[in-house]
Image (tube, grey):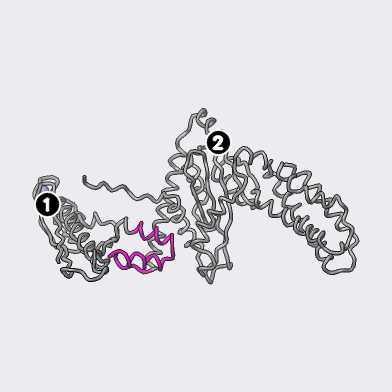
Amino acid sequence: MQWTVRLEAMTNAGEVKTTELVTFSRPGVVSTLAEIGLMLAETKTLLARLQASMLRGQVAAYAAYHRVCAACGVLRPLKDRRTRRLQTLFGTVEVEAPRFKVCRCRLTAPLAEVTVSPVCALLTARCTPELERVQAELGARTSFRDAARILEALLPVSPANHESLRIRTHAVALQLEAADRQAAAEVMGVRDEPAKAAAADTSRPVVMLDGAYIRAVPGHQTRNFEAICGKVEHEGHATRRFALVHSVAEQPHILLRAALLDQGWREGNAVTAISDGDPALPALVRSAMGGPVEPILDWFHLSMRVHHVEQVMGGLCALEPLPLVLPDHAQIDVERLRSLLWNGHHDKAYEALGRIKSWTKDAVVPNEPAAEAKVRRLVARCAELRSYIESNEGALIDYGQRHRAGKPISTSRAEGTVNQLVSARMNKRRQMRWSSRGAHRVFQVRAAVLDRRFGHPAIQLAA
Ligand SMILES: [Zn+2]
C-alpha cells in the first residue's frame, strides 16, 4: 500500500497550489504490529517538508507584497536574490530574501534607502519565537543536554546542542525579567482609590520565603551560593512562585514586586512575610513593597529548635540510673516550651529557657562522660533556642490563633517550592554545578513554567 500526502495551499485571492510532500509505502498485507501506522522518522520528514513548504510560501507572499511601491503601486526593481536560514521546531528552512532597489518614482531618496530587503526585516531572529520558548521550557525542566536530546528525538527540530539550549534559556529569562520590570513600572504609575486598597486589606497576600544552597562552578568565590525562593499566595489568585540569586539579580526586589502586583497587591496594602529568621528575607519584601511588612517567624523552624531541646532532655531522663537529680520543674518547663511558643507566650518561653539553663548548669553531674556530654548539649540547645527567640522577637505571633483562623504559619509550602524550583533541577545528586547568573536565569524560566505563566499563544485553527 502507498500513501501520498499532498499539501493544498490557497491564497487569499483563491489561487490553489498543490505540493506533494511525502509518500509512505507498506506491504499490502502487514505481517507485524510494527508495520502499522506512522513511524516517527516518517512523521519527522512529513513535518519538516510541511514546515518548509508553508514557511517559504508565507515568506514569498510577504516579499511580493512589500515589493510593491507604496507611493506609486509599481513593482520595485529586483537587485539580487539572497537567502536566509530560519531555525524552527520543524527544521531549519532556507528562504529567499530578495533585495529590491528603490522605486523609480523616488530616485531622489537618500542613499541609505537604495536597497531594501523586506524578508530580512521580517526575520528579526535566527529562530522562531516558538522554538526559543520550547527550548527554554525544556531547558528549565531538565538538563540542557537532555532537553536537546528530547527535542531531537521527537521532532525534526533544527540541530541544537546543550550550549545553544543554555543560551536560549538565558535569553528567555532576560525577556521574563524585562516583562516583570515593565509590569512593576506600569502599575506603579496607577494610583488606586483608598476604598479599593482598604477592601484588599482584609485578605492580605502572604509571601513565604526560604533560602536554598546551590553548588557553585569551580572558580566561584565560594563552594555554594544562596538562592531565595518563595511563593506569593493571595485569596482568589493562582499562587505565584519566584526565585532569585540576590547577588546577580538586577533589582531583585522588582521581581518580587512584580509577583506581588500579579497577586492583586497594590501600593499601600499590607503584606505578611513568613520566613525562617534570616533577616535578609523580610528585608527583601520590605524593599519590594516600599512599606512595612508583617513578619512571621516560620513555625516549622521554631518548632525544630524546640524539638532539639526536648530530644536532649528526653535522652537525659532515659539514662539508667539517672546520673543527676534533675529538678522536676526543669522537665516540666521543657514540656511547656512548645505550647508556650504556639500560643504566643514567647516571653514566658524565654524565661523558662533561662531557668532550665541555670539549673542544668548548677546540677551536680557525676563523673560520667555520657551524662556530662548530654548536660552540655542541653545547655547549648537551650541557649540556641533562647537567642533565636530573642533575635526574632518581632516576628513571633500567636501561632495557635492564626492556625485556627486557617491562615498559614509555616513556609512548608515555600519549601515545596524550593524542591520544585531548585532541588529538582539543581540538587547535588545531579552533580550539577552552577554559576550564580546561570542559576538565576534558569529560576526565572522554571518559576514561569511551574506557574503556567509561560503561556502558549493561542493559535486559532481554521474551522
Ligand atoms: Zn514608486
Let me know if residue 302 appears in the view.
Answer: yes
Quarter of the image with the C terminus is: top left
In the rendered image, residue 248, in percent from the top left (x then y), is placed at 51, 58
Q: Residues within 10 Å of mark 2 (few under 14, many from 20)?
A: some
User: Any mark on residue 320, and which?
Assistant: none
Check contact, mark 2 vs mark 1: CB within 8 A.
no
Q: Is residue 91 above or below residue 196?
A: below
The N terminus - image quarter: bottom left
Numbered circle sitting on residue 203: 2
Q: Which residue is mark 1?
A: 103
Q: Look at the numbered disc 1 and give the secondary structure of its residue.
A: loop
Q: Based on the displayed image, in which of its 4 quarters is residue 296 positioned? A: top right
What residue sits 21% from the left and 63% below the top?
A: 46
| Range of magenta residues | 132-161
Which label lies toward us, 2 or 1? 2
Q: How many marks?
A: 2
Secondary structure mostly taken by the magenta-highlighted segment of the chain? helix
Pointer 2 or 1: first along the chain: 1
392 displayed left or right of 215? right
Name the secondary structure under disc 2. loop
Q: Around disc 1, counting alpha carbons within 10 Å, would you say few (fewer than 14), some (14 to 19), or many (20 or more)?
A: many
Out of 284 and 69, give the one closest to the viewer: 284
User: Looking at the picture, does residue 256 appear above or below residue 195?
Assistant: below
Please state which amino acid type lies under the numbered disc 2.
Ser
- In the displayed structure image, the side of residue 131 where residue 60 appears, left or right: left
Q: Is residue 92 visible?
A: no
